[in-house]
Image: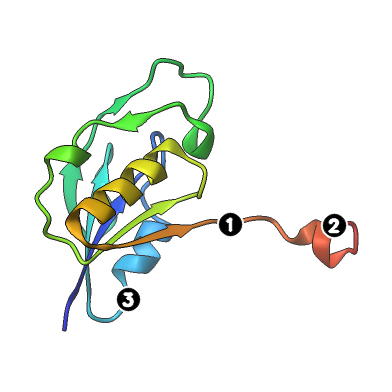
Amino acid sequence: MTRRLLWVSLADQRPGREQRWLSLLPGTRLTALAARPPLPPADWVPATYRRPVRRFVEAGALAWVRELAQLPPAYDWVGSLELCSLVTGQAAAYARRTAAVSASQSFTSLSRCRAGIA
């Protein structure tokens, strides 16, 4: 069985890290909808973003990916980074329309929690 995963990158997101880890999952074929080509093994659909303000980056960017609505329903999973980004909202709506599972990764630094400062 092959899991077909669409990774919807945030504006200014570097290729690698989360996208790379997911592409290495056994039985996964990842397609990155991104401004820059992903690290192999992944397919690439070039993306552009509507950004009325360029002040914020990655999860905080005021940005929408333009090409998502035109993609065919060819994926079992749709993933993105950070729960509160506008791109993640777009990805979740695409997943609902195409009956795919929506997933979002979120990371935080736990250094303060380990020190008991949380």
Q: Earlier in the sequence, mark 3 or mark 2?
A: 3
Residue 72 picture location, percent across and down: 9, 50
Is 112 in front, or is 52? 52
Residue 104 picture location, percent across and down: 44, 57
Dot 2, crowdedness within 10 Å: few (<14), some or many (≥20)? few
Vertical order, 4 against 48 (above or below): below
- To which residue does mark 2 refer? 118
- To which residue does mark 3 refer? 25
- To which residue does mark 1 refer? 107
Dot 1: what SS?
loop
Vertical order, 114 against 70 (above or below): below
Q: How far apart are labels 3 and 2 at the CA level?
A: 33 Å
Picture quadrant of residue 7: bottom left
Picture quadrant of residue 20: bottom left
Dot 3: what SS?
loop
Q: How far apart are labels 1 and 3 at the CA level?
A: 19 Å
**Which three-letter amino acid code belongs to the residue tagged 3?**
Leu
Residue 82 picture location, percent across and down: 50, 49
Residue at (53% x, 26% y) in the render: 56
Picture quadrant of residue 17: bottom left
Dot 2: what SS?
loop
Q: Quadrant of the N terminus?
A: bottom left
